[in-house]
Amino acid sequence: MITDKFGGSTVDYAIYLVANKEVDALVNGFAATPERTKNSDFSYFIWTEPYSMVVPQPEEEPRLFAFIRPFQTTVWLLIFITMFVMVLMMSLFSRLYGKPVNKFVQDRPVTPRQHSKTLTLLEYGRGNVAAVRLSFRILVGAWLLVATVLVNSYSGTVVAYLTVPKMKPSINTFEDLAASEDVQLLIKEDVIIGQQILAAKSGVLKTLADQARRFPADFMSKDQVTIDARLATGRYAYAWIQTYCKFFIVAQFKKDGTCRFQKSDPLPFQAAFFSIVLQKDSQFTSKFNDAVMLLWESGQIPFWVNGVIPQAPKCFTQSNPRRDLSRQVPIQLKDLMSAFFILGLGLSLATLVFLMEKIIYFKGRRPV
């Protein structure tokens, strides 16, 4: 009955119980809105804090193509032009070198035995030598280019790019979330911040709200258990008060043994003020106001809340680049993945060219 009438919203159901005088008060804090204050009284606030987002920890980018990063597009273009020029120049030198030798062999008087050896040499020069030289030119040209440009000029830069991990951009604002292709925003429809996001008429909030409205079954819900389960998959972000963010991050840390989530900076919303909800014109409203005000001003409520929040300091400490760089970490296989990729690519290309030349050579030797 509750699910059918209130769509699974415990917030709407709790307000309904107080407004219809079925309960005297709700001690679980709720934010006062003009619609809610029409039928209920709200005490002095018992808790206030800004909103943040729970977002997945940024993953490390794969280093398979890390060798591309140190160079701009113009540099890569010049590298390929240089490689092409090197092959052409070596081909030209090879032709210039081969012509005088052939002419000298043809003009020189020889005996029949020497003539037979000369024909064999010329046939070998016109066939296998040319094929081998072309593969050799490509190989030597590429090697000279890599040795000159990459090793001598950019050795330190390339080593740094290959061994230092690069993390994907961290999601810290709504703009970062809208730009992300892997993480989507979950919206709880019955809370104030969710309603403000859905009511946005422009800007990044409207973009996120439109994305959620296109697939409401995946990105919108009134059930907190469903939202928590989806958020734990690591493909979503969720905006709520910072205390909830801390509880969720620590709970996932204790479950998985690693910090899979992080808390963003405070979001550009007015801080949330939560109060006890009482019946309209209740005789207990003034008494609750006095008691809650005394507790808040004496610092008891913040002290109690901070005392029950589970601790996981490693999930909330800020990274120190200087300290991280000072650690001596053994070089792993993933650090050299890009280098092995270049080696495999070069060997594969050289082998392919060699096989193509051999195929062309043997086809040319077939009897007509």
Image: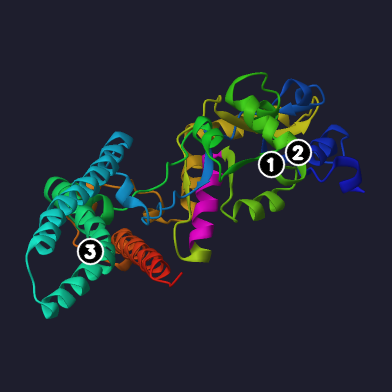
Residue holding disc 3: 329
User: 17 or 77: nearer the eye?
Assistant: 77
Disc 1 designates what residue?
Answer: 27
Considering every residue shown, the one lying at the far bottom of the view is 113
Q: Nearer the viewer, mark 3 or mark 2?
A: 3
The segment highlighted magenta reads 241-253
Magenta stretch encompasses residue 252: yes
Determine which of the numbered discs, if any, sits on residue 287 in the image: none
Residue 364 in magenta stretch: no
Depth check, front residue: 258 or 361: 361
| Residue 11 rendering spot, x and y as whole percentages | 76, 40
Q: Amino acid at mark 1?
A: Val
Q: Which mark, by number, is residue 25?
A: 2
Do we see residue 190 in this rendering?
Answer: no
Quadrant housing residue 362: bottom left
Mark 2 and mark 1 in contact? Answer it, CB < 8 Å: yes
